[in-house]
Image (spheres, rainbow, N blue to C red):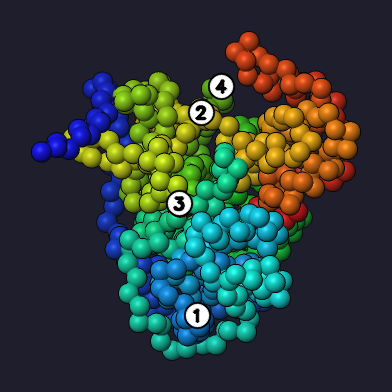
Amino acid sequence: MLERPTRIRLTGTDEALALHRRINRTADAYPRDASVPALFAESVARAPDAPAVAQGGRTYTYRELDLLSNGLARRLLAEGFAPGAAVGVCVARSPELIVTLLAVLKCGGVYLPFDAGWPDERLRTLFTDADCRWVLTDRHDLLSRRLDHCQVLSVEAELTPYAFAPAIQVTGDQLAYINFTSGSTGRPKGVPIRHRGIARLVLGARFAPLDAHSRLLQLAPVTFDAATFEIWGALLNGGTCVLYPEGLVRLSRLGRFLHEHGVTVVFLTTALFNAVIDEAPDALAGTRTVLMGGELHSMPHVAAALRAYGPGRLVHVYGPTEATTFATHHPVDHLDEGSGLLPIGRPIQNTRLYVVDGDTLCEPGRTGEIWLAGDGLSPGYLGDPRLTADRFVERVIDGTAERLYRTGDHGSLLPDGSLVFQGREDDQVKINGFRVELGEVAHHLDRHPGVRRSHVTVSTARGEKALVAFVVTDDPAVTPLALRHHLRTRLPAYLVPARIHLCEALPLTATGKVDGRALLTAYDSHTPPPATPAAPRPVGSRD
C-alpha cells in the first residue's frame, strides 16, 4: 500500500513563529458561504430606496438595480445560457455595467471583463481559455462582427425590470469572475475568483470604513481588479457606488466631482496618487479615506499627502490579483522619512501572510518571498495546471495545513509585524496599476521576423515609470513605428513600450545577462520625450 507523501513543513525560530502567529490573527466571522447576489439581496432588503449607483445626474436605487438585473439575468437564461459558464462583459463605466455584472452572477454565471480595444488575437486567447461563448455589451454592432463565435447580446436592448430573481442557487465557493493578467510566456494568465473571495474582501473591512454611509469612487477599468473593491465594497455594504463619468481622469475637475458626489472612499494607483499630490492636492481634501498602492511608493509624495491631510486618512494597500485585490494594509499616520520605508502593512481580515526563505519562516529583518493564504485565494490559473502547481502550494505551518500563493514578491517583517516590500524575484512590474510581465512584451517583439533580439525594461526618466524596449535588427525596414504597430495588433495598449530603441547589440553584465542599466544610460537619458504628454496614465484612461 502506497503511503501518502509527507507534506512539507515550514519551520522557523521561536521569534519568527511568534511574529507570524501574532500578525495572522485575522479570522473574523463573515458569511463565507453566501454568494454576491445573496449578499446584495440583503442590502436591497435593508434599504430598497437608498442610492446604489450614481453617475452624474443618474441614480439607481437598490430596488431599481435589483429589478433591472433580474430582468437581464432572466433574458440571458431565456437565450439558452447555462449556469456556471463564462460571460464576456464589455460595457462602458455606467449604471448599465453594474446591472450587467449583477445579472451574470444572478444566473450563476462568471463574468469575464474585457476591452473592445484589445487585439483580436488576445480576445481569442482569453475566450478560448475561459470557454466563453456569451457576450453582453453596449457595442453590439462592433463585437458581433469580431466575435462571430459567441452569442453577443446588447445590454441596452435587454434592460427590462422583473420582480423576481432567477431561482438559481449560487454558493460562496462558486466562481464569480475572471481577470486576465500579463503572462511571461506571451499568453495572458486567467485568474478566476470565487464569490467568497469578494465577500472576504469587502465585509468587515479593516482597511476602510465600508457601511451604508460609504460612497466609493468607481474609477478603475472593470478589467482591473481594483474595480472589485470599488463596486462590491459599496453594494454589499449598502453604500453608494459613484461612477466617474469619463475614461480619462481630469485632475482639474476631480476634486469638484468628489465634492459634488460626497465621495468618502477612494482608491488610487500610486502613479495617479502622485499626480494628484503634484497637481491637485486639494482634490482629496474632503475624502475620508484614500487608499493607494499597486506600485512602489514615492516617499516625498506620501509625506506631502500626510502633511496636507493629516493622520487617519491615508492607507497603503498591497495585493495580487490571485488574492482578490487587497491582501495587506498600512494606515499612514506618521513616517520614518530617514528610513525611506513605507510598509505595506499587515494582513487584512481573513487573510494570512508569511515571509519565507526556502522552507523557513523569516524572523524580523530577514528578506524572503511573500506567501499569502486565506479565503481570497484564486483556485488557480485557467488551463495551466503546471503554473498553478508551482504558484499555489500546500505547507504545514505551526501544525496547520495551509494552501498558499507564492507571490514572487520579496519582503521583510519589521519587529512590530509590518511588512516591507523589497522587490520581485522575476521581471514582473506594475505600471499605472497594470501588472506587466516584461517577458510577454519581449515574446511578441521577438516574433517579428526582422527582430534578432530584444530586451524590455522599465525607465523612470522624467519622473514617470514607462516601458522601454531595445531591439537588435539587420532589417532596414524595421523601425520603432513598425514595431509599435506590430505590438498593437497583439497586445493591449498598456503593454506597448512608450519608447523603442534600435541598437547594434545588447550589452551583457559579467554574469551573462543583458545589462539593462547600461542600455538605459546610453539610449534613454538623452531621448526626447514622446510626442504625447508624458504624465502618468490615470486609471480608467484609454489609449
Residue under numbered circle 3? 383
Q: CA distance from mark 4 to mark 2?
A: 26 Å
The kind of residue tagged 2 is Glu
Considering the numbered disc 3 on the image, is that residue within a helix, a strand or a loop?
Answer: loop
Which label lies toward us, 2 or 3? 3
Question: How many C-alpha atoms fall within 10 Å of the one at disc 3: few (<14), some, or many (≥20)?
Answer: few
Which label lies toward us, 1 or 3? 3
The kind of residue tagged 1 is Leu
Q: Earlier in the sequence, mark 2 or mark 1?
A: 1
Q: Position of residue 302 (x, y in %)?
A: 60, 37
Q: Earlier in the sequence, mark 1 or mark 3?
A: 1
What residue sits 40% from the left and 46% below the top?
385
Res. 4 image quadrant: top left
Residue under numbered circle 4? 338
Q: Is residue 505 left or right of residue 443?
A: right
Q: Is residue 62 left or right of residue 260?
A: left
